[in-house]
Amino acid sequence: MSDSRDTILKRLRQLSLPPRDLPPLDGPWTAYAQPMDTFREQLQAVGGNVLEADSPEAARARIAELIDQLGASNVFSELPDLWPGNVTLRPDDDPHTLGPLDLAIACGDFAVAENAAVWVTDRRIPHRVVLFWAEHLVLLVPTGAIVSNMYQAYQRIELQPGTWGAFISGPSKTADIEQSLVIGAQGPRSLTVIFGPFAD
């Protein structure tokens, strides 16, 4: 076995392939005439949901409906002025000691239409673990803060040293076991993105 492996590796090292130029990064990239429609279709395809609100009051109503539908008792909110929540997290809390969390309401900076991803940072959230630990997740995205593709998305990212960010799309899912799709296997069981008059 070892001799065979060494022989294969030796032959691979002897291969001489001509150099290839990297593909250009100046496009053209996929663009959508109606990025919101594409985002909604893509998010629904991966098990998520999109809502829209034209005022803070409408956003509160959407959140209240979700909390009622989900039967959420323990709620953390990154925007307490919009929805106070009843779970308080402090930066010095040990994430390993945090109790059950039914719903987390967090802020997304912008959305990406082609893959229904939302860019989320730890700018205002005390523990990024809540994004993955909560049973259900709501991301609040400013109306109009949406790009067509990931190339445009990377142009918008601004991370300071020591900060964290991630693209989040859809609820957690896996189909590793018997090719059977399981929602919420390693994270939130649902994701709802609400576009509304939220500060970015």
Image (tube, helix red, strand yellow):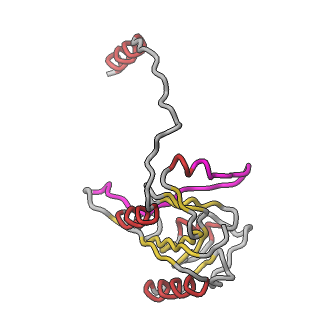
Q: Is the magenta stretch mostly helix, strand or loop?
A: loop
Instruction: Work out which quarter of the rendered image holds the N terminus and state it.
Output: top left
- Residue 173: x percent and y percent? 38, 62
Q: Write the start and end of the magenta stretch as one range.
A: 154-177
Q: Which residue is drawn at 50% across and 85% down?
A: 67
Q: Where is residue 168 in the image (x, y as percent from the top left)?
A: 51, 60
Res 198 quadrant in image: bottom right
| Residue 183, image x, y percentages | 37, 67
| Image-quadrant location for residue 100 | bottom right
Compared to residue 163, the image places residue 4 above or below, namely: above
Which residue is at the front of the view, 199 or 84? 199
Quarter of the figure with residue 124: bottom right
Instruction: Check the picture and name the quadrant holding the C terminus.
Output: bottom right
Instruction: Give the camera-side residue of 36 and 112.
Output: 36
Task: Please give the name of the residue rendered at 53% of the width and 77% of the height, measured from the top-left corner.
Answer: 103
Say above or below: 163 vs 134.
Answer: above
Whether residue 152 sits left or right of residue 190 in the image: it is right
Count numbered badges in the picture. 0
Q: Does the magenta stretch include residue 162?
A: yes
Tell me: residue 174, above or below residue 91.
above
Could you tell me which residue is drawn at 48 percent across and 51 percent down? 149
Q: Is residue 149 magenta?
A: no
Measured from the top left, where is residue 55 in percent x and y? Answer: 59, 82
Considering only vertical position in the picture, is 110 above or below 59?
above
Observer-nearest of 52 and 19? 52
Q: Is residue 164 left or right of residue 182?
A: right
